[in-house]
Amino acid sequence: MIYDQTVKRAPGSVAKYRQICDSLKDAIASGQYHAGQRLPSESELVEATSASRVTVNRALRELQLEGLIERRAGSGSYVRASVTTGYTFGLLIPELGLTEIFEPICRGMAEVQLDEHHVLFWGKSPGDSSSLENDARDLCQQWIAKKVSGVFFAPLELTSHADESNRRMMEFLERAGIPVVLIDRDLVPFPQRSCHDLIGIDNRRAAYVLTRHLIEVGCRRLAFVARHRMAPNCVGRGVGFREAVLDAGLEFQPEFIRLAAKPEDRDEIADLLKVCRPDGIVCANDYTAAQLMRTLESLSIKVPDQIRLAGFDDVKYASLLPVALTTIHQPCSEIGAAAVRAMIERVRNPGQPARDILLDFKLVVRESSGVASAALAHASI
């Protein structure tokens, strides 16, 4: 049966019911189940997927709500005769399941409401970080072999050969004539721009807003911290940080921006504190901020009493850290939906110029920036 193979392709962090739902979508799209054909019973699906009956029932209910199947009492579930499959798209997002923003982005892709039914292939479960490059190249070849209509690509970052791997995968897709929509980040260094549509937020402006917030709450010496080999969008965030500091008339030195930091390294962070003497730090993302917060605590530096701290992305744990994190909220679900619409436009009009489709963001103010009374405040920008 298809389920043993297809469920394994879905990311481990994706809910089981969604894995089953996507597996059945793939089977319908591939013609394994045609219009009017009965799907396996709930009992058969329970056995094939090792899921509970409640989980299987929820997956079938999702397919029913999406108009793909009809459920007949006492008879079973059938592919709707009216289902018309549009395009098939592949996800080439190596950090899916590892970086938190990508799952809600992909969920937005899967749930976008369109006139036609389009199939989204998730791919296999991600390996550990050491295998990301090989896994990504294998997945790229899978989508080419499937002759998908388009690929959503979030380029690799942080790995030693990320740039080369991104370039090679893009060459494969271009030779195959498969359109690509980039998610969250470009694959060339900032401020260069590739020739592919990019969906995300204005990282430069968002970092400016975040830095300005720290300045407005009293910071006068600020630093920017990013991990080694981070994506070009994080470099753009560093640019926005610098502009906000300079526009405020505050002191700025090149060493105030650390684009190759190890926030978990006590010696490196101690050196940053000695050289920069910051009273505020902007981090390139929430994960970096969480690591840095732990390191500062080990150095007996209190957040926000001695250093105010801010992150980026508003991931799930940002509000659950020992000191809730001020951050930039990305509209992940909306980014996913916008990406699908952009891809369809790209497939239908391949000659149109490459576009930056930038959605708005929110500044989320919490205790880490020293605004204790605004733990759950959201300030729209």
Image (spheres, helix red, strand yellow):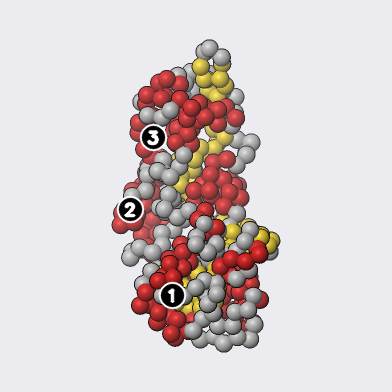
Q: Residue at x 55, y 75 (%)?
A: 305
Amino acid at dot 3: Thr
Measured from the top left, where is residue 289 in percent x and y?
48, 66
Residue 192 drawn at (x, y percent): 51, 70
Locate residue 324, reporting x and y percent: 55, 62
Whether residue 114 is visible to the viewer of this picture, yes or no, is yes
Q: Amino acid at mark 2?
A: Asp
Numbered tag placed on residue 128 in the rendering: 2
The mark closer to the camera, 3 or 2, is 2
Amino acid type at circle 1 is: Ser
Looking at the image, is mark 3 or mark 2 earlier in the sequence?
3
372 vs 235, nearest the viewer = 372
Residue under label 1, please give it: 300
The alpha-carbon separation of the residues under discs 3 and 2 comes to 20 Å
Whether 170 is drawn above or below 29: the answer is below
Q: Nearer the viewer, residue 101 or 347?
A: 101
